[in-house]
Every structure is written in structure tokens, then in C-alpha cells.
Image (cartoon, rainbow, N blue to C red):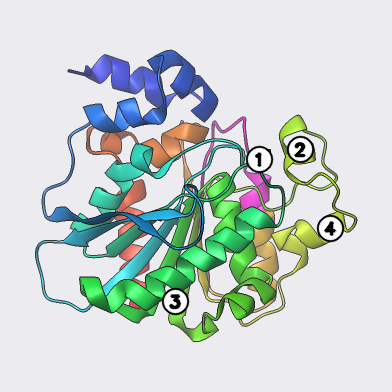
């Protein structure tokens, strides 16, 4: 059994430190924490494309009447690590809040580099829309969410309009985008992570969501921890400024004393007392989904 003290220590670590401290992938953390009632695994390992990294798990509410709004969640990991099994706690948490929830894998560096992981994100969104009704969801009420690199993926997929257009997803089906500790303004590439993930890109500024806001984007929820030393809060603050300048509705939340990994881990039941991320995210998402 994982202790409260151990959970508190994990909350303070960056995501890479979490994996090291647990001596195993994030899936170990996920396996140890209790899951929300009011949710069920509706499907595992559905393919939205070719290859083992293009798979989706689906979590459905067990209470209430559908059709339910849909949430599509993209995890982080420097575009180079992570798997959907480690984020089942997110799927259960959001399903218990009344969302048919899709948690998907995407191809990682060094197998691919930008823009492949954004293209995979758009393809997963298309899959969720195509299959939502089968699991009791509303394909025209979709909210996207992501943490860290996953927050970048969903933001870029929406703000750079070619991705959803090429995937065949109507823009009006996307009611909102929630980014938790996302990098949106990190050019020039000064970190090894970004240099590797965006290697070979000639137009670096065009990879940055802050530079591509045109107006007409769906509502955004941008959240960060004040103790985040991995993705600095100005990333979210600057994207919020650009969106508001373009007339887009934006809600921001800064969680005091929370670090980078802590923001997404606060969605897990034992850690919710540290930050009200789940409550804030679910309230906002219900509001924009209608």
C-alpha cells in the first residue's frame, strides 16, 4: 500500500523524478492509487492508426444519462516517454465526472519528430469523434486536455488549424482545450528535449502555439503550478494573453506550491487535497461542453 507520506513526496517531484523514485514507470503509481467509482473501462487497446503507439483506452461514466460529453487526454513525457496505462487514473477521474474519456498513446522521439506527434493527436481526436456514440458519448461535444508535452500536442492541433482539417475533424466539434503545465512558447530551442523533438525544423516560430493564434479558437483552460521548474509558468501566461487578445475565452489557474508532475498527479484521488485541479477542470469542461 502506498502511504500518504510517499504520495506527498511523489507530488513534489518532476515527472522524470517520479519514474526514477518509484523504480518503475508511472504505471506503478497508477496501479497503487485507488480509482474513482462511477467509472468503468469501456475498451482497451483500440487502434486509431497503424503500429503499437497508436492505441486508445476508453473510460465511461456508470452514472447519469448520455450522451455524455467527450474528453480526449494526451499525457506528457518530453515527447519521448509515457504510455496510456500509466494514466488510467485520469481516465477514471474524468469518467466519474461525467465525461466519456479517451486516453491515447502517440509515437515518440526518436522514432518520430515534430510534427508526427501532433498528427497522431489529431488522428486520435478523429477516432474519438468517430467512436464516441458507440460508447454513449456526444461526438459534437469534445473537450481536449493534456499535461506537459501532451498539452502542447492538443493546443497545437487546434491552434494550427491544418491538423484537425487534415484529420477530418470539424472545428465546431471541439468545445474547449485544457492545458496543464504546457509548453507553448519555447523557441529558440535551448533544451536538449526540444532540440531532439523538433530536430530538422526550418521554421521554428511556426511550431509555437503563441505565434499561431488567429481568433476563433475554442475556449481554453490553462493551469500551472507555481513551483514548476520544468515548464515555466510564462508559457501558459503568454498563451493566455495571445488568446484573450484575439477574443478567445480563457480561464487560468495557478496552483500554489505545486510542481510540474504534481499538477496531473493531483487528479488522482489521494492527492486532490493538494490542489483543486480536478474540480476546476471538470467544472470548466462541463461549462464549455454544454
Span of residues in magenta: 222-237
In the picture of the structure, the residue carrying the numbered disc 1 is 109
Separation (CA) of disc 2 from disc 4: 16 Å
Residues tagged 2 and 1 counted as in contact (Cβ below 8 A): yes
Dot 2 or dot 4: first in sequence order is 2
The mark nearer the N terminus, 2 or 1, is 1
Q: CA distance from mark 1 to mark 3?
A: 30 Å
The span from disc 4 to disc 1 (Cα, nearest Å) is 20 Å
Which mark's residue is nearer the viewer, 1 or 3? 1
Residue 128 in percent (x, y) is at: 39, 69
- Point out residue 181 in the picture as x, y percentages from the top left corner: 54, 45
- At mark 3, the secondary structure is strand
Q: Which residue is mark 4?
A: 205
Kindly check if marks 1 and 3 are in contact, taking CB atoms under 8 A apart as contact.
no
92 horizontally vs 196: left or right: left
Query: How many numbered badges does the structure rendering display?
Result: 4
Q: CA distance from mark 3 to mark 4?
A: 26 Å
| Residue furthest to the right | 202
Viewed as shown, does residue 18 lie left or right of 80? left
Q: Which residue is mark 2?
A: 196
Residue 266 shows in this picture: no
Q: Residues within 10 Å of mark 4 (few under 14, many from 20)?
A: some
* Dot 4: element: helix
Q: Which mark is residue 175?
A: 3
Amino acid at each position: 500500500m502506498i502511504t500518504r507520506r510517499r504520495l506527498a513526496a511523489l507530488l513534489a517531484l518532476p515527472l522524470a523524478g517520479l519514474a526514477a523514485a518509484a523504480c518503475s514507470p508511472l504505471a506503478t503509481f497508477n496501479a497503487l492509487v485507488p480509482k474513482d467509482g462511477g467509472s468503468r473501462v469501456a475498451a482497451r487497446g483500440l487502434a486509431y492508426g497503424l503500429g503499437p503507439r497508436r492505441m486508445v483506452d476508453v473510460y465511461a461514466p456508470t452514472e447519469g444519462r448520455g450522451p455524455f460529453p467527450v474528453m480526449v487526454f494526451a499525457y506528457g513525457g518530453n515527447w519521448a516517454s509515457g504510455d496510456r496505462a500509466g494514466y488510467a487514473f485520469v481516465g477514471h477521474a474524468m469518467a466519474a465526472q461525467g465525461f466519456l474519456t479517451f486516453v491515447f498513446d502517440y509515437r515518440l522521439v526518436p522514432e518520430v519528430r515534430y510534427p508526427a506527434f501532433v498528427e497522431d493527436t489529431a488522428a486520435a481526436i478523429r477516432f474519438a469523434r468517430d467512436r464516441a456514440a458507440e460508447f454513449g458519448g456526444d461526438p459534437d461535444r469534445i473537450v481536449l486536455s493534456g499535461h506537459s508535452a501532451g498539452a502542447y500536442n492538443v493546443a497545437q492541433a487546434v491552434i494550427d488549424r491544418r491538423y484537425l482539417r487534415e484529420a477530418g475533424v470539424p472545428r465546431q466539434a471541439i468545445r474547449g482545450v485544457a492545458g496543464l503545465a504546457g509548453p507553448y512558447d519555447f523557441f529558440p530551442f535551448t533544451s536538449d528535449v526540444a532540440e531532439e523533438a523538433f530536430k530538422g525544423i526550418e521554421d521554428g516560430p511556426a511550431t509555437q502555439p503563441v505565434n499561431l493564434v488567429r481568433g476563433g479558437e475554442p475556449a481554453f483552460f490553462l493551469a500551472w503550478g507555481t513551483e514548476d521548474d520544468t515548464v515555466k509558468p510564462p508559457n501558459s501566461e503568454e498563451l493566455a494573453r495571445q488568446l484573450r487578445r484575439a477574443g478567445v475565452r480563457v480561464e487560468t489557474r495557478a496552483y500554489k506550491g505545486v510542481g510540474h508532475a504534481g499538477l496531473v498527479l493531483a487528479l488522482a484521488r489521494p492527492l486532490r487535497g493538494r490542489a483543486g485541479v480536478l474540480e476546476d477542470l471538470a467544472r470548466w469542461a462541463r461549462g464549455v461542453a454544454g
